[in-house]
Image (cartoon, rainbow, N blue to C red):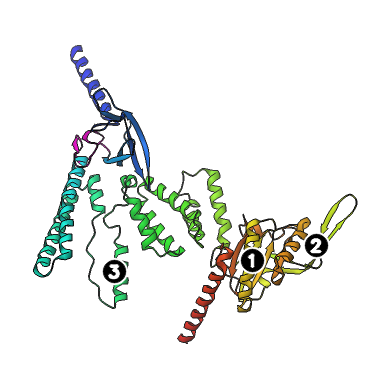
Amino acid sequence: MIKKIWSLSTIFLFTLITVFAADGYHIKVQLDNYDKDTLLLGYHYGDKQYIKDTVVVNDQGTFVFEGTEELDAGVYLMVMLPDNQYFQVLIDKGDQHFSMKTDATAPMANMQVEGSSDNALFYEYMDFLAKQRPKADAIKKEIETAEGAKKETLTKDLKAVNEGVVAYQKNLVTTHASTLSAAFVKSFMENPMPTFTGTEREVQLQRYKHYKAHYFDNIDLADERLVRSPFLFQRIDYYMNKLTPQEPDSINASIDYILGKVKPAEGTFKYYLVHFLNSYAQSKIVGMDAVYVHIVDKYYATGQAPWTEEEQLKKITENATTLKPILIGKIAPDINMYELDLEGTIQAKDDENEYKRWRAKRQLALHEVESPYTVLFVWDPDCGHCKKSMPQMLEFYEEYKNKGVEVFAVCTKIYDDMPSCAETIKEQGMIKWINVVDPFIKSKYKQIYDIKSTPQIFILDEKKEIISKRIGAEQLSEVMGKIIEFKAKEKAAAGDMK
């Protein structure tokens, strides 16, 4: 009895050892015609590639990548030195113990895989494509010069090649639906476009809407393996930047759509939420801060980014709160300033101290400026960029002052430095427009308008609604011209409708 119990225990222990031995990953690679002693294991993540592991060739002339924990599923890279040439390898859960053998000079064409049906399937597909491509290219070349019946025959031959590829893809995707190979192949398959009727413009619009609506039909955005692939980022980036109109409301809708689709895959959701936040926080395109605010309000402020540290989350949400009142389309916050009396600025000096005083004509609020358009211009006398901008600002004002444009120029200096404002205004010839200061910083305009550097420019309409902002002085004339032109067309169209 004791012997039997001991034997069962041994069997149980052996089973445990076997199970634990199968955990983690163990990938053996043999490379012919590769004279380097080091091989790297990289992986795709979003739009970048990273190195996961590095191994040196063993006594048997093979490279063995191994670890006690499984790798995250996705498309990995075997990177060869010194030129970082690579071939791809599919890593999936439960399929991380296998071997690969190939020739370093042509790895795709010579690949042999043992122990991984998914990688074998992938390389069979790649080999099939490699054989079909030259056939198609040769037929296309002949078609260029062919005529009549010959051209018709060649066109049928090309169609047959394409249909053969599609049939192969459909069979692979159907027969091996759960594999990473199937996800990869399916992502490049396109659904047929329906026939639409109407004018050429109407047909184009219908085709666009259909294509956009079905763009992700063949990609499971909730498949977390795909964030570590070379194609998911490309597809999402194309959807965001080519298929989505580049204005905040449309972009926000696309972001919500994509994040909703990927949310079941926590890793993918995290990647794209962070990616979108950073992209629009750093965007140089006017008005895209509205997208940043949307992301913060809808996702970060509602606890959907739990990985964010408390201090960082506070900074993000406070930044969005600051930006919200000064988004394009919002009524510009009113600020009460002092209009500088350029003739009344006094400099005085006694034996011990030099001191400076200033006088103001009157208090003047931004919203008190009566003009079809108001340009809020925040500048500093010590700012080199401001001084470079002055000639362009003055040229702009001369061009547009009789077209309903007023400049509300805020000098950032405080009480003791008021004379430097006046001196610069006189030197630069800025006396023609409204010059104001806030000597005691009562209006808190820097915080309200998020002034972190100068110069800063905001264009406001008659109602003091922000219609453009954070543009350079060199752009101001062109932008204002387009605004006035657009408003004129809008007014004319409204008149036609009456």
The type of residue carrying mark 3 is Arg
Give the label, 1 or 3, closer to the camera.
1
What is the x, y in percent for residue 293?
51, 57
Residue corresponding to mark 2? 358
Residue 417, placed above or below residue 406: above
Is residue 49 in view? yes
Mark toward the start of the polypeptide (2 vs 1): 2
Amino acid on which the number 1 mark rests in the picture: Pro
Name the residue carrying label 3.
207
Let me know if residue 181 is in the magenta part. Answer: no
Q: Quadrant of residue 92?
A: top left
- Toward the viewer: 228 or 20? 228
Q: Residue furthest top?
A: 2
Give the number of the disc on residue 391. 1
Image coords of residue 193 (percent x, y): 23, 66
Is 114 magenta? The answer is yes
**Do residues under tags 3 and 2 come within 8 Å of each other at their CB atoms?**
no
Mark closer to the chain start, 3 or 2: 3
Q: Position of residue 230 (x, y in %)?
A: 32, 48
Judge the density around disc 3: few (<14), some (14-19), many (≥20) Cα neighbours within 10 Å: some
